[in-house]
Amino acid sequence: MLTDLGGWVIATVVALGILSVAAGIAVFVVDSMARATFALLASFLAVAGVLLALDLVYLAVVTALMMTIEMAIMAVFMIMFMMNPAGLMPMTMVHNAKGSAVIGAGAFAGLTVGIWTVDWPTRDVSRPADSTRQLGEAIMGSHMLVMLVIGIGLFATIIAGTVLATARGRYDRFGADLAAEHPDDPVPGGLPR
Amino acid sequence: MTAELVLQVVLTVAAGLIGVGLFGALSQQTIVMVMMGLELVLNGVLLAGGAAWYFLAPDLPDAQMLVVVALVVMAVEMAMGFAVTIAFYRARQIDMIDMASDLRG
């Protein structure tokens, strides 16, 4: 168990846990949206550190790498679209903050009560030598259906994302019945059908 | 500190992340900030899944699969969220959900 690894691991897990929640709170406190993005990244990296301490090496590395790139993309989107990305003009862009705080605190309180009142089972089972191997064998074996569904979901996401983000599709260029002889382009010279 | 206590502390941290994320997703007006709140909720799910694997069922891969699914949900949420942001901005030059409240179902 974790206690076998020594007290410093527990101390690290607790410190990273506090850091992740503090960074999560900072996301909604700082003025600058760029800073909020990096606060969210700090929260993700702290959780990745906890996963690393819990022997989930592969998932920790995937979380850290994926979230670093994701937050970099998010920072770009902030600067492209948001009205106050640098936080130079302090402004609060919230609605129903009090009700949201009540719901958030209520969810936290309900979950915490459950966590500290449930009689957690103590299982003395053998730990796999390599958690990554266990996950890989599950993905390619007993849990393959999960990965198949994930694959279809990601493929649908690719199509839906492209459809939503496309400015002018073929129906804009050739009409609703796609029967136009020449495409209706703002600048002529576009590709034919 | 017993292992069970560590499990409860880690799960409490995950509950804190879920609570903060829920507050953000419900209170923020900017679309990207709403997405950040949802990401924080999923961050809590990641942490809870990892803790469940280590402390409750390390001999089974199910909790690890839950973490993988949560990671995929994060990626899908980001991709679709950004696509919706682009579509909104193209159609109306808006970046706040209150300006699109006529889309309420």
Image: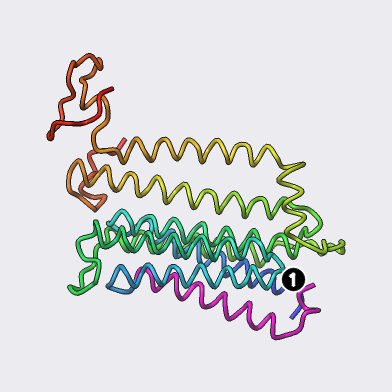
The residue positioned 64% from the left and 64% from the top of the image is A115
The residue positioned 82% from the left and 61% from the top of the image is A128
* Residue B22 position (above or below residue A141): below
- Tell me where residue A82 appears, x and y as whole percent: 24, 59
Q: Which secondary structure lies at badge 1?
A: helix
On screen, residue A104 versus residue A173, left or right, reads right
* Residue A150 position (above or below residue A33): above
Classify residue A95 by image quadrant.
Answer: bottom left
- Tell me where residue B24 appears, x and y as whole percent: 38, 61
Residue A167 part of the magenta segment: no
Most extreme residue toward the front is: A189
Secondary structure mostly seen in the magenta stretch: helix
Q: Quadrant of the N terminus of chain B?
A: bottom right
**Chain name for mark 1:** B
Front residue of this view, candidates B24 and A101: B24
Pointer 1 residue = B4
Residue A12 part of the magenta segment: yes
The color scheme shown is rainbow
- Tell me where residue A155 appears, x and y as whole percent: 50, 37
Q: Which residues are magenta?
A: A1-28
